[in-house]
Image (cartoon, helix red, strand yellow):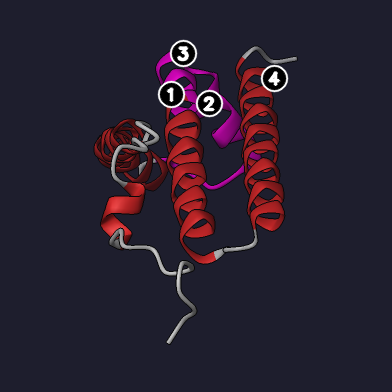
Amino acid sequence: MSEKGTESIQSPLGKVKGLGAAHNGVTHWWHQRITAITNIPLMLWLVWSVVHIPAWTHQEFVIWLEQPVNSILMILSILSVFYHAALGCQVIVEDYFHVEWMKITKLIGIKLFFFALTVTCIFSVLKISFGV
């Protein structure tokens, strides 16, 4: 039992009612679903294309990636897959890390990691496709 005057008569629901929501859960959910859906045809194209490369040499791959359609679809694949992965990692951190500073640090690290990875991959595709 608690001392008189220290016990709240409000229920836990009453304490949080009216505080509002963050209003970003729906957007995040939609982004995950949209990237998952776009990843399906992009990955089917990638698997089909890689299987049909005549020989697995560096030169054959460069010739394949120099074709505009292939380089554009590869860049779209990189953007979609890495954004989808970043969203998934964000959900894991938000669900399982309960120390606020650690959660924020992990989320910043995830965003920086996937941004750097995306830029590096796109740079590589552009470098190959333009023959630089």
Between discs 4 and 3, the one toward the N terminus: 3
Residue 123 among magenta residues:
no
**Structural distance between the alpha carbons of marks 1 and 3:** 5 Å
**What is the three-letter code of the residue carrying label 3?**
Pro
- Asked which quadrant contains residue 39, the reply is top left
| 2 lies above or below 42 | below
**What is the three-letter code of the residue carrying label 2?**
Leu
Frontmost residue, 104 versus 8: 8
Q: Helix, strand, or loop for circle 2?
A: helix
**What is the three-letter code of the residue carrying label 1?**
Asn
Mark 4 burial class by Cα count in 10 Å: few <14, some 14-19, many 20+: few
Identify the disc placed on residue 70: 1
**Structural distance between the alpha carbons of marks 4 and 1:** 14 Å
Is 131 left, or right, of 40 in this rendering?
A: right
Identify the disc placed on residue 65: 2
The region drawn magenta spans 53-75
**Structural distance between the alpha carbons of marks 3 and 2:** 8 Å
Between discs 4 and 1, the one toward the N terminus: 1
Q: Which residue is mark 3?
A: 68
Residue located at (60% from left, 29% from top): 62
**Structural distance between the alpha carbons of marks 1 and 2:** 6 Å
Q: Are marks 1 and 2 in contact (CB under 8 Å)?
A: yes
The x, y position of residue 80, in whole percent, is 42, 33
Task: Give the tally of numbered discs.
Answer: 4
Q: Helix, strand, or loop for circle 1?
A: helix
**Structural distance between the alpha carbons of marks 4 and 3:** 13 Å
Residue located at (32% from left, 30% from top): 27
Is 36 left, or right, of 74 in this rendering?
A: left
**Structural distance between the alpha carbons of marks 4 and 2:** 10 Å
| 76 lies above or below 45 | above
